[in-house]
């Protein structure tokens, strides 16, 4: 198995409330079936002086800012000093870290956003994990289901790894930058420090500290 796919090689687990649970997953997509359960377990343990429980299994940090037009379904946790802006739609099974931005018209579903993640404008992020300080440019999305509905396979050059999942968007390592209006196809894995050019259509694995210009031009960051 390729070491580059492993959870600890992509994500600084100290920057998520779900870090201890994620540490038990050798590969990060193995966590996707457990996000809702983790929300419930973690939510019940959160201190009341720091988090307010709203509605059905939604815990929101008291210093977070949630615009009145946002819609949040549980189970969900929203971390300290995070902003959930106008028209955001969180469909449940979402763990959103501290100092994050969930922007206007952004939709989240079955996700973990590590601390300091930004999804600020017109993003769809589903069945995905976004690492510490990762950023989705305006209009960039994760595509989480293949057109033929078969299970997602992670591919790196000639190597393939079966995930057994029909729904799996992307894993973004720490400090990933995704350019505006890009699509991350099912099973995309971006290593730490990767940058994706705007309007890209990305699939497979991009090694850490590389820049995706297009499929034929993936270069080491200098």
Image (cartoon, rainbow, N blue to C red):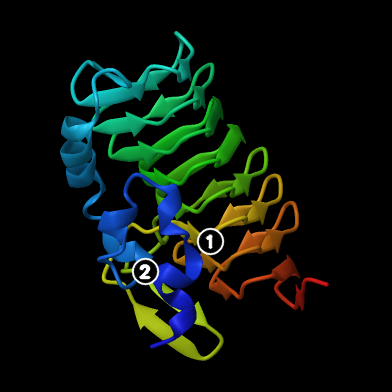
* Residue ID for mark 2: 152
In the depicted view, which residue is nearer to us: 73 or 114?
114
**x, y percent for residue 82:** 49, 27
**x, y percent for residue 151:** 31, 69
Q: Is residue 19 above or below residue 159?
A: above
Quadrant in the picture for the N terminus: bottom left
Judged left or right of residue 62, residue 130 is right
Quadrant in the picture for the C terminus: bottom right
Q: Is residue 199 above or below residue 212?
A: above
Judged left or right of residue 70, residue 149 is left
First of labels 1, 2 by sequence position: 2
Packing grade of label 2 (10 A; few <14, some 14-19, many >=20) is: many
* Residue ID for mark 1: 173
**x, y percent for residue 130:** 48, 51
Q: Is residue 158 above or below residue 154?
A: below
* For discs 1 and 2, the disc positioned in front in the rendered view: 1
Judged left or right of residue 193, residue 89 is left
Quadrant in the rendering for residue 23: bottom left
Furthest residue toward top: 68
**x, y percent for residue 21:** 25, 56
């Amino acid at each position: 198995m390729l070491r580059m796919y492993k959870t600890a090689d992509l994500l600084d687990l100290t920057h998520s409330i779900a870090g201890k649970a994620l540490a038990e997953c050798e590969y990060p997509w193995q966590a996707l079936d457990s996000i809702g359960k983790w929300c419930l377990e973690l939510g019940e343990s959160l201190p009341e002086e720091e988090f307010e429980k709203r509605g059905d299994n939604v815990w929101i940090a008291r210093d977070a800012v949630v615009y009145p037009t946002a819609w949040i379904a549980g189970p969900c946790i929203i971390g300290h000093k995070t902003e959930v802006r106008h028209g955001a739609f969180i469909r449940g099974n979402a763990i959103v870290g501290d100092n994050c931005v969930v922007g206007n018209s952004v939709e989240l579903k079955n996700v973990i956003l590590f601390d300091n993640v930004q999804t600020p404008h017109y993003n769809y992020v589903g069945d995905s994990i976004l690492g510490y300080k990762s950023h989705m440019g305006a209009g960039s999305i994760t595509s989480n289901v293949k057109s033929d509905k078969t299970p997602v396979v992670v591919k790196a050059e000639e190597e393939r790894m079966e995930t057994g999942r029909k729904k799996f968007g992307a894993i973004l390592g720490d400090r990933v930058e995704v350019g505006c209006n890009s699509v991350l196809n099912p099973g995309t894995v971006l290593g730490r420090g990767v940058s994706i050019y705007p309007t890209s259509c990305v699939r497979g694995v991009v090694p850490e500290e590389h820049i995706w210009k297009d499929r034929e031009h993936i270069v080491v960051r200098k």
